[in-house]
């Protein structure tokens, strides 16, 4: 009987690590693993959270780079170290001596360790025009895009009373901010909310936003249910984050319920409650920016490298 093996000596279809997710966290992890001479497979569904944005900001040395360009460079870098990348999805995973990882194309591969970097998706308010303009002049993060729209007239759409925090934050980038209560009743604002909004110079307007008004492919304002028009060139919204935790749940990982969704309980390296399974990026929290995700992927991969080595040495020592 012959044993089909790769040039690295691994049985075909068996990897040291399978990384699920090819965004900043997954590619960063794969880069570290490849450089550590670990046979690694990245399975990438091609759904990065920041895909609607034309550029990303706040990443030292990559400020202003397009998300697509950033990922393209990352894929080129991991390929230099022999990391394999498959476009597609993981449809099933089972624990055993190794992890059995099923792909949507029908293949099954084996992995000694897993890094889950599946991220999350943003569920946007159901106002006509919001989804189409998200990442352009409908924004959610002032740290990501505030500088580019500084001093323009901002609107903030309140999906929950927590929208007060967003309205206060964006007032650092513009002194012309209107807070549209939308789904929030005036009585839901606390006295402290009102004092802070007033101190920040934020105008509060009750009423539901029913449509965005666009002229020549530019946001010019919003219209309320009462028919009134309010000129604004930027609208901030607060999407509801929906973590992609299906694989982690399937593996029995402990999740922690937060106001922003359920995320896996992890240690400082990203190790979940499931032995051999790490998580990184937006898979562990909604506020992980690209630079945080890349750092988290690095930490998880370094921990995996050490974990694999110690298990091999223990096995060799008997």
Image (spheres, helix red, strand yellow):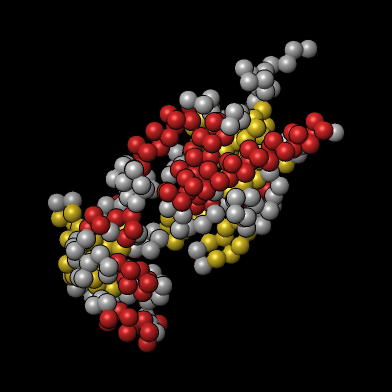
When the figure is inspected, residue 214 is found, relative to residue 40, above or below; the finding is below
Q: Quadrant of the N terminus?
A: top right
When the figure is inspected, residue 263 is found, relative to residue 99, above or below; the finding is below
Q: Quadrant of the C terminus?
A: top right
Q: Nearer the viewer, residue 26 or 207?
A: 26
Say if residue 121 shows up in the picture. no
Check the image and name the residue furthest to the left.
216
Check the image and name the residue furthest to the top.
1
The residue positioned 67% from the left and 32% from the top of the image is: 110
In the rendered image, residue 120, in percent from the top left (x then y), is placed at 48, 52
Residue 131, by quadrant, is bottom left
When the figure is inspected, residue 255 is found, relative to residue 179, above or below; the finding is above
The residue positioned 15% from the left and 55% from the top of the image is: 215
When the figure is inspected, residue 307 is found, relative to residue 107, above or below; the finding is below
Q: Nearer the viewer, residue 66 or 302?
A: 302
Residue 35, by quadrant, is top right
């Amino acid at each position: 009987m012959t044993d089909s093996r790769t040039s690295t000596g691994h049985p075909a279809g068996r990897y040291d690590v399978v990384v699920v997710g090819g965004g900043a966290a997954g590619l960063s992890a794969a880069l570290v693993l490849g450089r550590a001479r670990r046979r690694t497979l990245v399975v990438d569904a091609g759904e990065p959270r920041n895909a609607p944005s034309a550029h990303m900001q706040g990443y030292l040395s990559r400020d202003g780079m397009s998300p697509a360009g950033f990922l393209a460079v990352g894929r080129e870098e991991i390929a230099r170290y022999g990391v394999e990348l498959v476009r597609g999805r993981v449809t099933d995973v089972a624990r055993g001596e190794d992890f059995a990882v099923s792909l949507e194309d029908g293949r099954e591969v084996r992995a000694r360790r897993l890094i889950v970097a599946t991220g999350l998706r943003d569920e946007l308010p159901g106002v006509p025009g919001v989804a189409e303009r998200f990442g352009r002049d409908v924004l959610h993060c002032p740290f990501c895009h505030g500088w580019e729209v500084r001093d323009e007239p901002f609107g903030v759409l309140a999906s929950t009373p927590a929208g007060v925090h967003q309205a206060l934050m964006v007032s650092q980038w513009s002194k012309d901010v209107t807070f549209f209560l939308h789904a929030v009743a005036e009585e839901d604002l606390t006295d402290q909310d009102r004092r802070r909004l007033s101190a920040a110079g934020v105008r509060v307007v009750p009423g539901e936003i029913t449509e965005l008004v666009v002229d020549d492919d530019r946001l010019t304002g919003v219209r309320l249910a009462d028919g009134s028009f309010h000129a604004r060139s930027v609208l901030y919204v607060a999407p509801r984050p929906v973590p992609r935790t299906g694989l982690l749940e399937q593996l029995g990982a402990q999740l922690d319920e937060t106001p922003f969704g359920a995320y896996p309980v992890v240690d400082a390296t990203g190790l979940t409650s499931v032995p051999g399974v790490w998580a990184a990026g937006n898979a562990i929290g909604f506020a992980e920016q690209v630079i945080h995700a890349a750092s988290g992927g690095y930490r998880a991969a370094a921990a995996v490298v050490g974990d694999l080595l110690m298990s091999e040495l223990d096995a060799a020592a008997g």
